[in-house]
Image: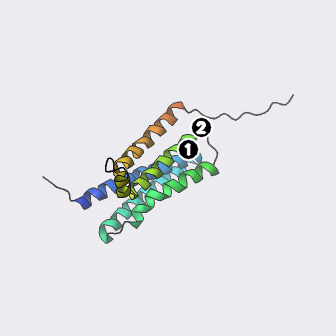
Amino acid sequence: MLFWSNSYLLTFVFLQMMASAASLLSILVIERIDERMGISCLSSLITLVLVSIACERTFDDLRLCMMFHIVPCIAIPALLFLFPPKYTHSRFWFCATGFYLLATFEAIADKKIYSASQYIISGHSLEHLCLAMVPIILTVMLWFRSIKIARYMQTI
């Protein structure tokens, strides 16, 4: 039976989180900009995820891995402001990004949250609750949205 050490488990968790953030960012590129550009964005981001995991394992340096926690929180709202939506209910992307950013800050302030809550709940637990809200919010968005139809004024 294979027992993983904590470092391998941490690498596996980072790999999952970075791949999900890369796929969310490329889905937004597909939705807002262009399908071909979104597919190439996905393949390049997944390659960068694998390179960052290899760097983390080789050099024991998490800086490149941490980039994937902050960059989607900046890039997703920027794409939302810069490119017009093709579908309704696009504001849910802001909500999902907000929960992802909140989860990142809760992970950073884990011990402070745990002591501030008088040792009832930790920041890590709150991080998981916020991260669970992201797919729920995006599912609700997909459930209610429809294609925006451009309406032109008719001239008489």
Name the one closer to the observer, 37 or 29. 29
Task: Give neighbour class at mark 1: few <14, some 14-19, many 20+ (Cα, 10 Å).
Answer: some
> According to the image, label 1 marks what residue?
31
Q: Which residue occupies 47% across, 52% down?
A: 101
Hey, which residue is sitting farthest left in the picture?
Answer: 1
Which residue is more in the foreground, 91 or 156? 91
Question: Considering the numbered disc 2 on the image, is that residue within a helix, a strand or a loop?
Answer: loop
The three-letter amino acid code for the residue at tag 1 is Glu
Q: Is residue 15 visible?
A: no
Q: Position of residue 115 (x, y in %)?
A: 34, 55
**In the rendered structure, are the residues bearing label 1 and label 2 in contact, judged by CB atoms less than 8 Å apart?**
yes
Crowd tier of the residue under label 2, counting other residues whose Cα lies within 10 Å: few below 14, some 14–19, many 20 or above: some
The residue located at (45%, 62%) in the rendering is: 67
Left or right: 61 as drawn, with respect to 31: left
Q: Position of residue 156 (x, y in %)?
A: 87, 28
Q: Is residue 134 left or right of residue 36?
A: left
Which residue: 40% across, 46% down? Answer: 131
Residue extending farthest to the bottom is: 59
Image position, residue 22 (x, y; %)? 45, 53
Q: Is residue 87 above or below residue 33?
A: above
Quadrant of the image occupied by residue 52: bottom left
Observer-nearest of 1 and 43: 1
Q: Residue at x 70, y 35 (%)?
A: 150
Relative placement, left or right, of 97 versus 148 is left
As drawn, the residue found furthest toward the right would be 156
Check the image and report above or below for 21 versus 50.
above
Q: Secondary structure at mark 1?
A: helix
- Give the residue type at disc 2: Tyr
The numbered disc on residue 87 is 2
Residue 82 sits above or below residue 141 on the image:
below
